[in-house]
Amino acid sequence: MLQESIHTEPISPLRPSDSIVEALDHMEEWKLAHLPLVDAGGTYLGLISEDALLAAADDRAQVHTVLNPAFAPSVLPKSHAFAVMDVCTRDRITIIPIVNAKGLYEGAHLLTDVLEFFRGTPALSQPGAILVLFAPLSTYSLAEIASAVEQNDAKVLAIWLTKTKAVSDIEITLKINLEHSGPIVQSLQRYGYEIGGIFGDKNFDEDYQQRYDHLMNYLKY
């Protein structure tokens, strides 16, 4: 899952002498809201946003006049895909510049390429149920969760941890390789995990619908 596994687009960077109109034309051509700015020596100067260009008083001015030097997100060559996604989501950018240790611009990834890369991973591409669990951080155990899954002849495809409003608790999103999660849910509940939601489980969806239908029929009378 190295960064080089994510497709790289041959996107030419902006130059300081380019006009704001030219920069907007390039963004329209690539359907992007950001483009990297590079000097004559190839040094990466920062990322120019479409919002900054549109806010400029004179669209004939040179693009470097709207540059915010503090806004220069990038990743190193061969960064892990998770690092690329982190920069992309943290700064909410549509293009992720690749900049080497010397500060030279080497290329870029598009947000769509990053999403396509992750879509091809087993966590997203393989069918299976998604379970949302809640537990105190102090009692969370990956080994315990994996045991509850594997003792029911299933595999963990992915697991994500998310902070909750309660500082001491975490939300655990679990993707498994089976669509029938009933026995796994029961095992996790025995371990003390609270079930916050079940998605992609056809049996659960059908059971939920039957319960809803029974309730509606009951209310009619």
Image (cartoon, grey):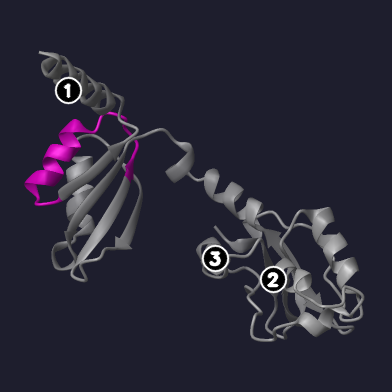
Q: Position of residue 215 (x, y in %)?
A: 15, 21
* Quadrant in the picture for residue 136: bottom left
The residue that appears at 52% across and 69% down in the rendered structure is: 90
In this rendering, would 41 be left or right of 31?
right
Q: Earlier in the sequence, mark 3 or mark 2?
A: 3
Q: Disc 3 designates what residue?
A: 80
Question: Going 60% across and 55% down the picture, which residue do you hit?
Answer: 114
What amino acid is labelled 3 in the image?
His
Residue 34 visible: yes
Total label count? Answer: 3
As measured in the structure, the alpha-carbon distance from the residue carrying label 1 to the one carrying label 3 is 45 Å
Q: Mark 2 or mark 1: which is in front?
A: 1
Q: Point out the stretch of residues depicted in magenta.
A: 175-193
Q: Residue at x 19, y 66 (%)?
A: 137
Q: Position of residue 219 (x, y in %)?
A: 13, 19
Circle nearer the N terminus (2, 1): 2
Residue type at mark 1: give it. Answer: Arg
> In the rendered image, which residue does mark 2 sit on?
98
Mark 3–mark 2 Cα distance, whole angstroms, equals 12 Å
Q: Amino acid at mark 2?
A: Ile
The quarter in which the C terminus is drawn is: top left
Q: Residue furthest front?
A: 221
> What residue do we see at 69% from left, 86% from top?
69
- Mark earlier in primary sequence (1, 3): 3
> Disc 1 vs disc 3: which is toward the camera?
1
| 12 or 71, nearer to the observer | 71
Q: Which residue is mark 1?
A: 211
Q: Is residue 43 visible?
A: no
At label 3, counting other C-alpha atoms closer than 10 Å, the crowd grade (few under 14, some 14-19, many 20 or more) is some
Quadrant where the N terminus sits is bottom right
